[in-house]
Image: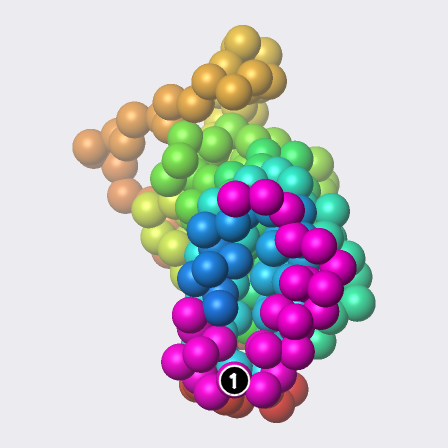
Amino acid sequence: MGDMDAKSTEHALEALKRRNLEGKRALIADLRRRQTDKAVEILIDVLRDDSWYLRELAVEALGEAGERAVPLLNEVLRSGLWYSRAAAARTLGKIGHVPSIGVLVDLLEDPNQTVKGASLASLADFVRGGRAVAVARAFHALGPRRAEERKRLFLAVHEEPGRVVGELLDNPSELAAAVSSPAAGDGTPETPPAADAGSTPAPASPGPPVRDPRPSPGDAREP
Protein backbone atom coordinates (compact mmCIF):
# COMPACT_ATOMS: atom_id res chain seq x y z
CA MET A 1 0.00 0.00 0.00
CA GLY A 2 1.37 3.42 -0.91
CA ASP A 3 2.39 6.17 1.45
CA MET A 4 -0.28 8.39 3.00
CA ASP A 5 -0.76 11.83 1.47
CA ALA A 6 -1.20 14.97 3.57
CA LYS A 7 -5.00 14.76 3.43
CA SER A 8 -5.01 11.13 4.57
CA THR A 9 -2.61 11.94 7.39
CA GLU A 10 -4.79 14.81 8.59
CA HIS A 11 -7.85 12.55 8.44
CA ALA A 12 -6.08 9.85 10.47
CA LEU A 13 -5.03 12.31 13.16
CA GLU A 14 -8.53 13.72 13.37
CA ALA A 15 -9.99 10.21 13.57
CA LEU A 16 -7.75 9.39 16.51
CA LYS A 17 -9.27 12.32 18.37
CA ARG A 18 -12.91 11.60 17.53
CA ARG A 19 -13.34 7.84 17.30
CA ASN A 20 -14.32 5.64 20.20
CA LEU A 21 -11.79 3.20 21.64
CA GLU A 22 -12.66 0.40 19.22
CA GLY A 23 -12.43 2.77 16.26
CA LYS A 24 -9.02 3.96 17.42
CA ARG A 25 -7.88 0.36 17.82
CA ALA A 26 -8.95 -0.39 14.24
CA LEU A 27 -7.14 2.70 12.96
CA ILE A 28 -3.91 1.74 14.73
CA ALA A 29 -4.19 -1.76 13.25
CA ASP A 30 -4.50 -0.19 9.79
CA LEU A 31 -1.44 2.00 10.42
CA ARG A 32 0.44 -1.09 11.56
CA ARG A 33 -0.32 -2.79 8.25
CA ARG A 34 0.72 0.25 6.20
CA GLN A 35 4.18 0.62 7.78
CA THR A 36 4.83 3.84 5.85
CA ASP A 37 6.79 6.84 7.12
CA LYS A 38 3.55 8.78 7.68
CA ALA A 39 2.01 5.83 9.50
CA VAL A 40 5.06 5.74 11.78
CA GLU A 41 4.69 9.47 12.51
CA ILE A 42 1.05 9.00 13.50
CA LEU A 43 1.90 6.00 15.70
CA ILE A 44 4.52 8.13 17.43
CA ASP A 45 1.74 10.62 18.16
CA VAL A 46 -0.25 7.79 19.78
CA LEU A 47 2.58 7.32 22.30
CA ARG A 48 1.53 10.73 23.64
CA ASP A 49 -2.08 9.61 24.16
CA ASP A 50 -3.21 9.33 27.77
CA SER A 51 -4.72 5.88 27.14
CA TRP A 52 -2.38 3.10 28.27
CA TYR A 53 -4.21 0.64 25.99
CA LEU A 54 -3.64 2.74 22.86
CA ARG A 55 -0.02 3.38 23.76
CA GLU A 56 0.59 -0.37 24.10
CA LEU A 57 -0.90 -0.95 20.65
CA ALA A 58 1.36 1.74 19.23
CA VAL A 59 4.43 0.23 20.94
CA GLU A 60 3.75 -3.14 19.29
CA ALA A 61 3.15 -1.52 15.89
CA LEU A 62 6.27 0.65 16.08
CA GLY A 63 8.31 -2.36 17.15
CA GLU A 64 7.60 -3.77 13.70
CA ALA A 65 8.49 -0.50 11.96
CA GLY A 66 12.15 -0.96 12.76
CA GLU A 67 15.00 1.51 12.94
CA ARG A 68 13.32 4.29 10.96
CA ALA A 69 11.22 4.98 14.06
CA VAL A 70 14.29 5.53 16.27
CA PRO A 71 14.89 9.28 15.56
CA LEU A 72 11.26 10.08 16.35
CA LEU A 73 11.39 7.92 19.49
CA ASN A 74 14.44 9.86 20.65
CA GLU A 75 12.44 13.08 20.27
CA VAL A 76 9.75 11.63 22.53
CA LEU A 77 12.40 10.67 25.09
CA ARG A 78 13.70 14.24 25.12
CA SER A 79 10.39 16.07 25.37
CA GLY A 80 7.53 13.69 26.21
CA LEU A 81 5.60 13.27 29.43
CA TRP A 82 6.58 10.38 31.68
CA TYR A 83 4.14 7.89 30.15
CA SER A 84 5.26 8.80 26.62
CA ARG A 85 8.91 8.40 27.58
CA ALA A 86 8.16 5.00 29.11
CA ALA A 87 6.37 3.89 25.92
CA ALA A 88 9.26 5.11 23.77
CA ALA A 89 11.75 3.22 25.95
CA ARG A 90 9.76 0.00 25.58
CA THR A 91 9.55 0.52 21.82
CA LEU A 92 13.34 0.76 21.53
CA GLY A 93 13.55 -2.65 23.16
CA LYS A 94 10.94 -4.09 20.80
CA ILE A 95 12.88 -2.76 17.80
CA GLY A 96 16.15 -4.18 19.12
CA HIS A 97 18.19 -1.17 18.02
CA VAL A 98 21.58 -1.96 19.58
CA PRO A 99 22.94 1.65 19.52
CA SER A 100 19.97 2.60 21.72
CA ILE A 101 21.27 0.48 24.61
CA GLY A 102 23.28 3.46 25.84
CA VAL A 103 20.15 5.62 25.72
CA LEU A 104 18.24 3.08 27.79
CA VAL A 105 21.05 2.90 30.35
CA ASP A 106 20.98 6.71 30.61
CA LEU A 107 17.23 6.52 31.25
CA LEU A 108 17.93 4.63 34.47
CA GLU A 109 18.73 8.11 35.82
CA ASP A 110 15.22 9.31 34.94
CA PRO A 111 13.38 10.65 38.00
CA ASN A 112 10.24 8.73 37.03
CA GLN A 113 10.04 5.12 38.24
CA THR A 114 7.83 4.00 35.35
CA VAL A 115 10.40 5.23 32.82
CA LYS A 116 13.12 3.37 34.72
CA GLY A 117 11.01 0.21 34.74
CA ALA A 118 10.39 0.43 30.99
CA SER A 119 14.10 0.95 30.34
CA LEU A 120 15.04 -2.05 32.48
CA ALA A 121 12.46 -4.19 30.66
CA SER A 122 13.94 -3.23 27.29
CA LEU A 123 17.48 -3.91 28.50
CA ALA A 124 16.29 -7.34 29.64
CA ASP A 125 14.89 -7.92 26.14
CA PHE A 126 18.31 -7.13 24.69
CA VAL A 127 20.00 -9.62 27.01
CA ARG A 128 17.48 -12.32 26.16
CA GLY A 129 18.09 -11.55 22.49
CA GLY A 130 21.81 -12.27 22.87
CA ARG A 131 23.10 -8.74 23.47
CA ALA A 132 24.36 -9.18 27.02
CA VAL A 133 27.86 -7.99 26.09
CA ALA A 134 26.52 -4.72 24.67
CA VAL A 135 24.48 -4.10 27.83
CA ALA A 136 27.42 -4.97 30.10
CA ARG A 137 29.68 -2.70 28.08
CA ALA A 138 27.22 0.21 28.48
CA PHE A 139 27.10 -0.39 32.25
CA HIS A 140 30.89 -0.68 32.43
CA ALA A 141 31.28 2.70 30.70
CA LEU A 142 29.55 4.37 33.65
CA GLY A 143 32.52 3.73 35.95
CA PRO A 144 32.81 1.22 38.82
CA ARG A 145 30.42 2.79 41.33
CA ARG A 146 27.56 3.57 38.96
CA ALA A 147 28.01 0.31 37.07
CA GLU A 148 27.67 -1.60 40.35
CA GLU A 149 24.51 0.35 41.25
CA ARG A 150 22.93 -0.34 37.86
CA LYS A 151 23.94 -4.00 38.00
CA ARG A 152 22.24 -4.45 41.39
CA LEU A 153 19.11 -2.65 40.22
CA PHE A 154 18.95 -4.77 37.06
CA LEU A 155 19.45 -7.99 39.04
CA ALA A 156 16.74 -7.03 41.53
CA VAL A 157 14.13 -6.40 38.81
CA HIS A 158 15.12 -8.91 36.10
CA GLU A 159 16.97 -11.71 37.84
CA GLU A 160 18.21 -13.88 34.97
CA PRO A 161 19.25 -11.08 32.55
CA GLY A 162 20.77 -9.26 35.52
CA ARG A 163 22.76 -12.34 36.48
CA VAL A 164 24.16 -12.71 32.96
CA VAL A 165 25.23 -9.04 32.80
CA GLY A 166 26.54 -9.18 36.37
CA GLU A 167 28.80 -12.13 35.58
CA LEU A 168 30.32 -10.21 32.68
CA LEU A 169 30.88 -7.12 34.82
CA ASP A 170 32.40 -9.19 37.63
CA ASN A 171 34.89 -10.76 35.19
CA PRO A 172 36.58 -7.92 33.28
CA SER A 173 38.78 -10.32 31.30
CA GLU A 174 35.72 -12.23 30.09
CA LEU A 175 33.99 -8.98 29.15
CA ALA A 176 37.10 -7.74 27.31
CA ALA A 177 37.36 -11.01 25.40
CA ALA A 178 33.68 -10.87 24.47
CA VAL A 179 33.92 -7.24 23.34
CA SER A 180 36.91 -8.02 21.10
CA SER A 181 35.14 -10.95 19.44
CA PRO A 182 33.68 -10.37 15.93
CA ALA A 183 30.13 -10.95 17.19
CA ALA A 184 30.34 -7.96 19.52
CA GLY A 185 30.38 -5.40 16.74
CA ASP A 186 28.14 -6.80 14.03
CA GLY A 187 24.68 -8.23 13.69
CA THR A 188 25.60 -11.70 14.91
CA PRO A 189 23.84 -12.53 18.19
CA GLU A 190 26.20 -12.84 21.11
CA THR A 191 26.28 -16.02 23.15
CA PRO A 192 25.50 -15.31 26.81
CA PRO A 193 28.00 -16.79 29.27
CA ALA A 194 26.99 -20.16 30.68
CA ALA A 195 25.84 -20.18 34.28
CA ASP A 196 28.12 -21.84 36.80
CA ALA A 197 25.99 -24.56 38.33
CA GLY A 198 28.01 -24.47 41.54
CA SER A 199 27.79 -20.78 42.20
CA THR A 200 25.12 -18.67 43.81
CA PRO A 201 24.73 -15.00 42.84
CA ALA A 202 25.42 -12.53 45.62
CA PRO A 203 22.20 -11.03 47.02
CA ALA A 204 21.35 -7.74 45.41
CA SER A 205 20.38 -4.56 47.16
CA PRO A 206 17.17 -3.63 45.35
CA GLY A 207 17.24 0.09 46.15
CA PRO A 208 14.02 2.07 45.60
CA PRO A 209 11.13 0.13 44.07
CA VAL A 210 10.79 0.37 40.31
CA ARG A 211 7.27 0.75 39.02
CA ASP A 212 5.85 -1.70 36.51
CA PRO A 213 5.93 0.10 33.13
CA ARG A 214 2.21 -0.57 32.69
CA PRO A 215 0.13 1.95 34.66
CA SER A 216 -3.59 1.47 34.99
CA PRO A 217 -5.49 2.20 31.74
CA GLY A 218 -6.26 5.89 31.40
CA ASP A 219 -3.97 6.90 34.27
CA ALA A 220 -1.88 9.78 32.93
CA ARG A 221 -0.94 11.34 36.23
CA GLU A 222 2.69 11.81 37.21
CA PRO A 223 3.37 9.24 39.96
Q: 218 or 146, which is in the foreground? A: 218
The structure residue drawn at horizontal position 46% and vertical position 60%, both measured from the top left corner, is 30
Is the residue marked by circle 1 packed among few (<14), some (14-19), or many (20+) residues within 10 Å? few
How is the model colour-coded? rainbow
Q: Identify the magenta region.
A: 1-26
Query: Which type of secondary structure does the marked residue at label 1 adopt?
Result: loop
The structure residue drawn at horizontal position 47% and vertical position 87%, both measured from the top left corner, is 20
Q: Position of residue 149 (x, y in %)?
A: 59, 54
Residue 203 in view in this figure:
yes
The structure residue drawn at horizontal position 46% and vertical position 18%, both measured from the top left corner, is 188
Instruction: Tell me the residue that label 1 is attached to.
Output: 19
Q: Position of residue 108 (x, y in %)?
A: 63, 59
**In-image side of 74 versus 131 (left or right):** right
The quarter of the displayed image where residue 199 is located: top left
Q: Is residue 107 above or below residue 99?
A: below
**In-image side of 123 versus 100 (left or right):** left
Q: 126 or 135, which is in the foreground? A: 126
Q: Is residue 146 above or below residue 223?
A: above
Q: Is residue 193 above or below residue 123?
A: above
Q: How many marks?
A: 1
The structure residue drawn at horizontal position 37% and vertical position 28%, both measured from the top left corner, is 192
Q: Amino acid at mark 1?
A: Arg
Q: Position of residue 88 (x, y in %)?
A: 61, 60
Q: Main secondary structure of the magenta part?
A: helix
Q: Is residue 168 above or below residue 8?
A: above
